[in-house]
Amino acid sequence: MNDFPQYDINYEPLVGTLTKLDVGEVIAKVTEPWFNQTLCQVDDAVVRLGVFQGEYHWHKHDNEDEFFFVLDGGIRIELEDNPTVELGPRQCFTVPKGLLHRPIVPERSSVLMIERAGIVATGDA
């Protein structure tokens, strides 16, 4: 169940192994301001696509690092007790497990995330 109705979060992978996926087509179909879709699982990790605009809430993942790779647009990641990180196209950054953070996305942007399977996108309570 999604306790954050303003976010469209989909944990079921779109494809399995040996399946081609056009990520551009997935991005083009998104109409929600904060969309998060698992594309596939690779061993114990998932590759997720975010199509974002706006501000996410402050959160952390107690047991998982979170990797962000910007495809297009830009994202700013505010970090507790650390400088804010700004990423543009084809730039990446890893937020370590346990660090409180908040993505802010001024314009519609597409981001790939790689995380451990089973991660809760909205963070740990």
Image: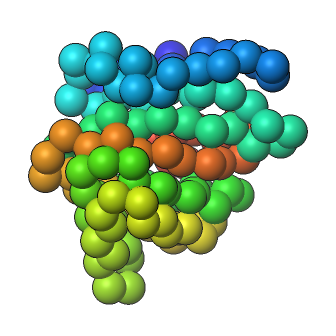
Tell which residue pokes out farthest to the right in this image.
43
Q: Which of 65 and 52 is in front in this view?
A: 52
Measuring 19% from the left and 40% from the top, which residue is drawn there? 108
- Place of residue 34 in the rendered image (x, y in percent of width and height, measured from the top left): 28, 32
Tell which residue pokes out farthest to the bottom in this image.
82
Measuring 79% from the left and 37% from the top, which residue is drawn there? 42
Tell which residue pokes out farthest to the left in this image.
106
- Place of residue 94 in the rendered image (x, y in percent of width and height, measured from the top left): 55, 67
Looking at the image, can residue 3 be seen? no
In which quarter of the view is residue 66 placed? bottom right
Number of numbered discs present? 0
The reply, left or right, for residue 115 in relation to residue 88 is right
Q: Is residue 84 above or below residue 13?
A: below
The reply, left or right, for residue 2 in relation to residue 40 is left
Measuring 33% from the left and 75% from the top, which residue is drawn there? 85
Colour scheme in the image? rainbow
Measuring 49% from the left and 56% from the top, which residue is drawn there? 68
- Place of residue 25 in the rendered image (x, y in percent of width and height, measured from the top left): 40, 18
Q: Nearer the viewer, residue 54 or 21?
A: 21
Q: Which of 93 and 58 is in front in this view?
A: 93
The reply, left or right, for residue 104 in relation to residue 66 is left
In which quarter of the view is residue 82 placed? bottom left
The reply, left or right, for residue 15 in relation to residue 94 is right
- Place of residue 75 in the rendered image (x, y in percent of width and height, measured from the top left): 28, 58
Looking at the image, can residue 1 be seen? yes
